Image (tube, grey):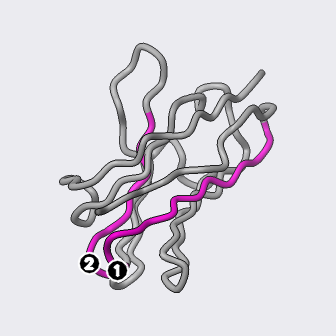
Amino acid sequence: EVQLVESGGGLEQAGGSLRLSCAVSGFTFGVYAIGWFRQAPGKEREGVSCISTRDGSTSYADSVKGRFTISTDNAKNTAYLQMHSLKPEDTAVYYCAAGSYPCNGIDFWGKGTLVNVAS
């Protein structure tokens, strides 16, 4: 059974940093790309970042470029999203997902972790 479990969300002040983790089980890294998506209250879910676990290629939404960094620890089957210079508009439920790079097609979703950025 494939599982993606997010952690690391919480309340942070604007300008602060958080690191989200996504623990993956049920498949070996290299088979799927790993992506981070987010959904703010009243808005549609949007893609934040994606990483190929085969060659390390990455992509980012324009709104997070230069502030967020996606990475993986293949030995631990874990993906990360390091978030710096957080803004109130980054407030959302963040989801980890597995699919085909650049994460346009998703096969598996995590349940999400809430990030709340206070102004």
Q: Position of residue 101 (x, y in %)?
A: 26, 66
Residue at the far top: name it: 42
| Badge 1 amino acid | Thr
Q: Residues within 10 Å of mark 2 (few under 14, many from 20)?
A: few
Residue found at the far front of this picture: 1
Position of residue 17 relative to residue 34, above or below, is above
Judging depth in this view, the residue of 114 and 66 nearest the camera is 114
Q: Which residue is denoted by mark 2 in the rendering?
A: 31
The residue under the point 59% across, 26% down is: 89
Residue 77 is covered by the magenta coloring: no
- Percent position of residue 67, x then y: 63, 52
Task: Give the magenta part as a residue range.
Answer: 15-38
Pointers 2 and 1 in contact (C-beta within 8 Å) = yes
- Please, what is the three-letter code of the amino acid marked with disc 2? Val
Q: Is residue 109 left or right of residue 113?
A: left
The reply to whether the magenta stretch includes residue 34 is: yes
Q: Image point 25% across, 61% down: which residue?
A: 99
Coordinates of residue 85 in the picture (x, y in percent): 73, 44
Query: Where, quadrant-wise, is the N terminus in this rendering?
Result: bottom left
Q: In the image, residue 26 lies at what x, y percent? A: 33, 70
| Labelled disc at residue 66 | none
Q: Which mark is residue 28?
A: 1
Mark 1 Cα within 10 Å, few/some/many (few <14, many 20+)?
A: few
- Up-down: is 81 above or below 48? below
Kindly state the secondary structure of the residue where label 2 is placed: loop
Which one is in front in this view, the residue at disc 2 or the one at disc 1?
A: 1
